[in-house]
Amino acid sequence: MSKVVLITGASRGIGRATARLLGARGWTVGVNYRHNEPAADETAAEVGRAGGHARVLRGDVANEADVIAMFDSLENAYGRIDALVNNAGIVAPSMSLADMSAERLAHMFEVNVYGAFLCAREAARRMSKDRGGDGGAIVNVSSAAARLGSPGEYVDYASSKGAIDTMTIGLAKELGPQGVRVNAVRPGLIDTEIHASGGRPERAAVLGVQTPLGRPGSADEVAEAIVWLLSDAASYVTGSILDVSGGR
Ligand code: NAP
C-alpha cells in the first residue's frame, strides 16, 4: 500500500522537489499551498509523471481549521497518514530588529512557528500508536539561519527556525515511544524563489559562492535529505538535525 505524506508549502521550491522525489518512490502526496493554485497543480502533475499520486490541498498552515481540514481530507481519501514534511515558511525583507514592525514579527512567528506546531500536532494526534495510529515520520524544514542568527538580515526568521530545531528535539523524545520519528533538515543557501520574496532574488547566487562548496544548493539536494529521513533507511534516526548547507 502506498504511503501517504502531507507536504506543506509544496507549490514550489523545496516542497515541490520533495513531492516529486516522493512521487518517484511511489508515495501518495498531499500538496499543500496557500495562494498559488496553478503552481500546486503543476507540482501534482510532476508527482504523477514521477509515478506517484497527488492530492492538492489549499490551506494556510497558520489557520487551525485549515490544518485540520487538510489532514482530514487526506485521511478520508486514503485511510491513513504516514508522514508530514513541515516545509511551508516565509522570509521578509532584510533589516535590523530595531526597524521591524510588530505586524512583521507576528506574521513571521505565526507562519514559521505556530503553523509548524499546528501541523506537527495534527500529525502526532493521528500517527501516535496510543491514539490508534500506526506510527510514522515527521521532517521539519529548519534553516542554517537557526545557528547563524542572520544579523542585519532577519533575526526574526532565524529565531523562528531556532524554535523548529527545539521542537524537533523535544517532539522526537515525546513521540519516539509512539512510533513516530521526528527529524529536521537545515538548508543553507538554496536556489529558490524565497529570496525574491525577501526582496533579494540574487541572494543565493551571490552568497553561495562564499560557502565551502562554492555554490548555492538546489531544492533537489535538500529533497534528497528529507526523503532519506522519511524512509525506512533512516529507521534508527530521530531527533537529528541534518545540515544541508554546503558546509556553511
Ligand atoms: P518558497 O520557494 O518561497 O516556497 C514557499 C512555499 O511555502 C510555497 O509553496 C508557499 O505557497 C508556501 N507557503 C508560504 N506561506 C504559507 C502558509 N501560510 N501556508 C501554507 N503554505 C505557505 O520557499 P523554499 O525556499 O522552497 O523554502 C521552503 C522551506 O525551506 C521554508 O521553510 C524555508 O524557510 C526553508 N529554507 C529555505 C532556504 C532557501 O535558501 N531557499 C534556506 C533555509 C531554509 P504559495 O506559493 O501558495 O504561497
Image (cartoon, rainbow, N blue to C red):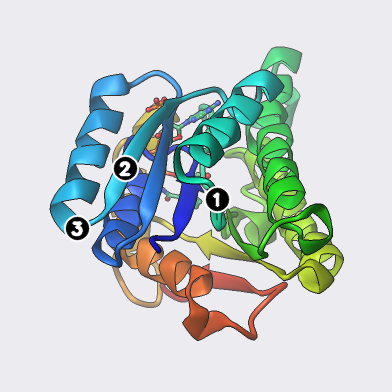
- Give the alpha-carbon distance from disc 1 to disc 2, as whole Å: 14 Å
Evaluate whether residue 105 shows in this view: yes
> Percent x, y for residue 214?
30, 71
The image shows a total of numbered marks equal to 3
Mark 3 sits on what residue?
Answer: 51
Residue 196 higher or lower than 237, as above or below: above
User: Callout 3: few (<14), some (14-19), or many (20+) C-alpha neighbours within 10 Å?
Assistant: some
Residue at horizontal 59%, vertical 82%? 235
The vertical placement of 113 against 144, above or below, is above
The N terminus - image quarter = bottom left
Residue labelled with disc 1: 80
The reply, left or right, for residue 103 in relation to residue 203 is right
List the residue tagged with mark 2.
Answer: 54
Secondary structure at badge 3 equals loop
Q: Which numbered disc flags the more N-terminal residue, 1 or 2?
A: 2
Instruction: Give yes or no for contact between labels 3 and 2 (Cβ–Cβ under 8 Å).
Output: no
Q: Amino acid at mark 2?
A: Ala
Split into quadrants, the picture shows ligand 1 in the one at top left
What element does badge 2 sit on?
Answer: strand
In the image, the residue with mark 2 has its CB under 8 Å from the nearest atom of ligand 1: no
Residue 95 lies, in percent from the top left, at 59, 30
The kind of residue tagged 3 is: Gly
| Whether residue 245 can be seen here | no
Callout 1 secondary element = loop
Labels 1, 2: front one: 1
Q: Residue at x 45, y 37 (%)?
A: 77
Out of 56 and 11, give the one closest to the viewer.
56
Q: Nearer the viewer, residue 227 or 202?
A: 227
User: Which callout, 3 or 1, points to the residue nearer the camera?
Assistant: 1
Dot placed on the residue nearer the N-terminal end, 3 or 1: 3
Q: Measuring 56% from the left and 51% from the top, which residue is drawn there?
A: 81
